[in-house]
Image (cartoon, helix red, strand yellow):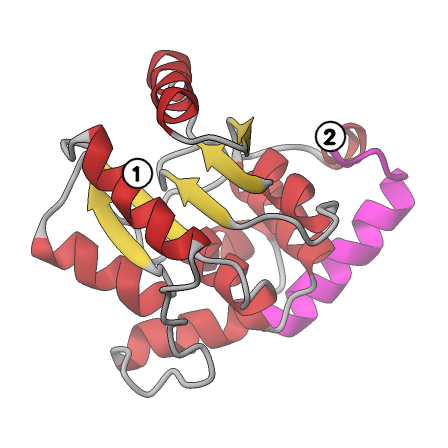
Amino acid sequence: MNKILIADDHPLFLEGLKSALQNRLHNTFIDHANSYLTLFSKIQNDDGELDVVIMDLNMPGAANVSGLYFLRQTYQEIPILVLSAHDSQETRAECLLAGASEFISKSIYIDELVSVLHDIFNGDYQFPNTNSLSTLPESLSKHFQQLSNLTPSQFKVLHLIANGDTNKSIAISLNISEKTVKNHISAIFTKLGVSNRTQASNLFLKHKTTI
């Protein structure tokens, strides 16, 4: 059985896409996430059967391609399709440089998307180069390199810091103790070379997109 994970925070679009794919794809299980935090958790807890992630970028927990880049670096084997309503050449290029396998406009016909998914299921898929940052602009390369030093747990905490969450709310969201949150934050500051939450948030949100 094929397995797809769709990540989008618009319920109507999410349900519409899920229903359309279920009607056209046989022997396929479709799961969903409505935030980066949920997306990270579901991939982290996956049993290795996930075939492809279809994701929007503009979800709770991210305002740029940082989440996409971290997913690609952490889970290099998973095809990631970015499905966006904003399909400018600049946006497309930034997503592909950050590690998207494909960049697809939300205006695409469902049969075209199904065709792309069939190619992936059949193994007709070329993995993007995730070993080098040399093709990125210098500022973006440095930004991504800093983020790639974080562990998945630390990256989740950084997302929530950037959202303005307190240590207590972060602990509740991640089901960990406040002491563990503080330990993660200390490690994040060290790895990013910052000294407070504002600096960490600003670095994380540095390369905002209009997606």
* Residue pictured at 22% horizontal, 45% vertical: 104
Q: Nearer the viewer, residue 1 or 141?
A: 1
Q: Secondary structure at mark 2?
A: helix
Which quarter shows the N terminus? top right
Earlier sequence position, callout 2 versus callout 1: 1
Amino acid found under the numbered disc labelled 1? Val
Q: Nearer the viewer, residue 81 or 57?
A: 81
Residue 140: image tag: none
| Main secondary structure found in the magenta portion | helix
> Is 197 rendered above or below residue 178?
below
Q: Magenta stretch containing residue 148, yes or no?
A: no
Residue 170 left/right relative to 87:
right
> Is 16 rendered above or below residue 181?
above
Q: Are marks 2 and 1 in contact (CB under 8 Å)?
A: no
Looking at this rendering, what residue extends furthest in the left direction? 89
Amino acid found under the numbered disc labelled 2? Ser
Q: Nearer the viewer, residue 164 or 77?
A: 77
Residue 173: image tag: 2
Residue 146's x, y, as percent?
A: 52, 73
Mark 1 burial class by Cα count in 10 Å: few <14, some 14-19, many 20+: some
Residue 86 left/right relative to 66:
left
Q: Nearer the viewer, residue 56 or 21?
A: 21
Q: Secondary structure at mark 1?
A: helix
Q: Magenta stretch containing residue 188, yes or no?
A: yes
Q: Which residues are magenta?
A: 173-194
> Is 57 rendered above or below residue 149?
above
Q: Dot 1 corresponds to which residue? A: 114
Which quarter shows the C terminus? top left
Residue 150's x, y, as percent?
A: 65, 66
* Residue pictured at 78% horizontal, 30% vertical: 168
